[in-house]
Image (cartoon, grey):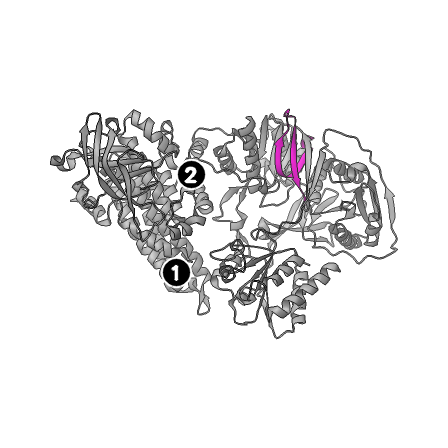
Amino acid sequence: MDLTLSREQEMARGLFREFAEREVKPLAQQIDEEERFPRETVEKMARLGFLGIPIPREYGGQGCDELTYLLCVEELAKVCATTAVLLSAHVSLACGTILKHGTEVQKQRFLVPLAKGEKLGAFALTEPNAGTDASAQQTRAVLDGDDYVIDGSKIFITNGKEADIYIVFAMTDRSKGTKGITAFIVEKGTPGFTFGSKEKKMGIRGSSTYEICFSGCRVPKENRLGDEGKGFGIAMQALDGGRMGIAAQATGIAAGALDRTIAYVKQRRQFGKPLSKFQNTQFQIAEMATRVQAAELLVFKAAQAKQTQKRYSVEASMAKMFASATAVDVTARCVQLHGGYGYTREYEVERMMRDAKVTEIYEGTSEVQKMVVAGALL
Amino acid sequence: MNIIVCIKQVPDTTEVRIDPKTGTLVREGVPSIMNPDDKAGLEAALRLKDALGAHVTALTMGPPQAETVLREAMAMGADAAVLVTDRAFGGADTIATSTTLAAAIRTMDFDLIITGRQAIDGDTAQVGPQVAEFLKIPSVAYAEGIQLEEGGKSLLVHRRFEDRSHVVRVKLPCLVTALSELNAPRYMTPGGIFEAWREREIRVLKRADLPELRDDEIGLKGSPTRVAKSFPKAMKPAGTVKAGLSADEAADEITSCLQAHFVL
Amino acid sequence: MESMNNEKTGGVFTFAEQVDGELSKVSLELVGKARELAGGLGTSVTAILPCAEMGNMARELVESGADRVIVIAHPSLGDYATEPYAHAVASVIRREHPEILLYGATSIGRDLAPRISARVRTGLTADCTSLEIDPETKALRMTRPAFGGNLMATIVSPNHRPQMATVRPGVMQALVPEKGRAGTIETFDPGFTKGALDVEILEIVRRAADTSDIGSADIIVAGGRGVGSREKFALLEELAGVLGGTVAASRPCVEAGWVEPSRQVGQTGRTVRPKVYFAIGISGAIQHLAGMEGSGLIIAVNNDETAPIFSVADLGIVGDLNEVIPRLIQKVRAAKAG
């Protein structure tokens, strides 16, 4: 079994790392402090094709593979979790869903500009009363002539106010439960589509997380993604992909915090010697490095499954569950090794610890991931 | 217009460390990169291509794994790549290297050759001017600006010296050596990387492909210079801290320290 | 290709570089070093001086140690251009068969020397910091930094003459000029014709050395909280000015508004690796050290002898910067003038 990256994946990883260090890292603290969406970074990534890495060339993408895209998310997350998640939501949730379920016309019209980076994508499933229980959707879509009329609201939407193209889930037949959910492609600017309040978050504070609202929003019939009633399945498949993106993001956050901590403990001296000479430090670093590598290997495994298997829910859930726990654990330990300095905003581990927590929550909490894994086994 | 860009794969010397116990160079885990000045040269060529439609060929000499920098050049936008590689070329100093490169270039069409000013592993800045001499074409070192003149027969080059720049006109064909300050090289694209590895060919030139070269002008045998020995730079001694000096003594102390380090 | 062997040799030669009709400092340093090497070989020192007009330059070379100066005066040799210079120096090599030929490792020397090494097909060692004659073989041992300065290499050119090297400016010592020192000054005309290798100089743009960016500065004079005020940074500016360096600061000075943010060194500022880093009134908090530890030579001045900066300093002065720095400025000025 070969666990090494191919030469092209290795070179692409080098590209992502260089881009992250040079273009993304200098902004990371600032966008966190100012809670500002890094639009300039999105534009740079768009020019370089980062917004369509795993999408085939005929749809405006780069024609690379899933793992190469996940390496991009991971490298970005090493320096800025906000930048990583905006890419993950755009690629895994928006592009990936249209690629898998869209008609040829929808792909040409929506996927091509998304993959080229001319437009940004978002995914709107969660509602105030439909979080982990996504089946409790209250947003409605009613066919009226050639349009569906959508009413309701969605919360915690990543790329909320910044996206141009939204995948929106709504009930077309409440009597059928999850089999009554349908997916739609809604463009920004559609009358009746507005933005609610911005969330004030603990971490990934540069990410644009908004409530989005629909009030008599008319969406043409040809924007329906898949058949009526197939929305829940589409959402769950999208989340399988999205969870791999978050697993890569979590792995990156942990790896980034570990890198900084290794540098710090070699430099910081207490009791007349560098922290790195204390056995506690050495054991902590060894444990963290092992966990980070294990998380990365689960991401690789999931990426391989997505490339070769029809279903990969278990692999995606395992990767996300483990990687997000690793991110939370490793960043907290890194702050501890930094001591008082680690609690200040001058050191990035402080931000990384705040950023890490959300990876255990969004795109399915860790508890949901356990349900998925257990469901496959029992 | 045909442009050849000479590039070199080098260890990232900012990552090179000396083993404090053995005093030897630690090259393990040191990434190999495209030499920065060469990358600026490639970018300059690609900008001429973007503006005028030139055909850009990346050329390198090195071990087989130097293929990587050629793939990188193609992922940035080079149209073709040539790898000069053979055990017979190994151990070459700058003269033997430029002799070999010049022979390889004679097998190709060119109007302009761009090299980096110098490689960060050797820092000699010799290969560019030497290649030009062997090809009997003019060279302009230290370009911080390159423009093709109207008519396409000559270049205007801003050539940097310590305290001044010369604006010079040089007729094609010629060779220009590029400074990193010339431009900010573009990034590769992920799709470009995949295409470069999966769909593009590299032309390989071996010893037998360059029959006009004599054995006594290539490789170690054809190198006028020899490394007699190499050794780590003397380790930095622990610093000295002086207290209780008068201001005058303190200033003297600093001045002689600066003189000892050739700052004064 | 023309191969030079060492049957017929003619001593130690230097390339005398002039800019605007004045010798570069390194030209005199080379003559000084060449004297020492010629002593070891029992031979003489010859300087090659391509120029538009020799003026007083040939005399200067003799007074600084040259036994002989070969002047090649031609209008095309006023401002440096590769081809006429290469032609001039290569013609001297073919006529004189030097044993050794040294150039300054300046922009001019580093362009000219490789062109000539290819023309006469001989070895060339770049950026030497040490040159010595092997007592047994009489070969020139040329030592230079490699791998970004991490390693030193000693190079020899066993079978090719001249043995050529470019030499870092400021490393070799020029001799104290001896007024009226004897030496021959001769002119040589290799003949100049315009050819395909010529390059036309259209314009020369002079510029002041740019020291504004702390990331690329060779010398940084950094101040910390101990400097005390925005006004007192003028003292650091003055020191930086006489040394040709630039001013930087630690975070407290930037936050106090004494210095602009682009000049902050440290964890939340820039990481710098200048050849010389002065830490003046900087205690050396770990965040600051992270940004400057890689500097070549670190000189710290602080009145607190327990300041952590002293643990990374090559030279630490415990003292009042307000007294030490003004004296230092005077002494640096004096050293530069002398």
What segment carries the magenta color?
Answer: B133-161
- Which chain's residue wears label 1? A
Residue B56 seen in the current view: no
Q: What percent of the width, then of the height, locates residue C6?
A: 77, 42
Q: Are marks 1 and 2 on the same chain?
A: yes
Quadrant in which the N terminus of chain C is drawn: top right
Asked if residue B199 lies left or right of residue A85, the reply is right
- How far is mark 1 from mark 2, CA to CA? 32 Å
As shown in the figure, which amino acid type bears the numbered disc 1? Gly
- Per the rendering, the mark at residue A342 is 1
Q: Residue at x 64, y 44 (%)?
A: B124
Image coordinates for residue C137, horizontal then vertical, percent: 73, 51
Which quadrant of the view contains residue C187? Answer: top right
Disc 2: which residue: A43
**Number of the front mark, 1 or 2:** 2
Q: Position of residue C135 (x, y in %)?
A: 74, 55
Q: At label 2, which amino acid type do we have?
A: Glu
Magenta-colored stretch includes residue A80: no
Residue lying farthest bottom?
A: B244
Pointer 1 or 2: first along the chain: 2
Does A113 sit above or below residue B27? above
Q: Nearer the viewer, residue A79 or C174?
A: A79
Identify the chain of the residue marked 2, using the numbered disc in the image: A
Indicate whether residue B160 is drawn in magenta: yes
Q: Nearer the viewer, residue C69 or C221?
A: C221
Q: Secondary structure at mark 1?
A: helix
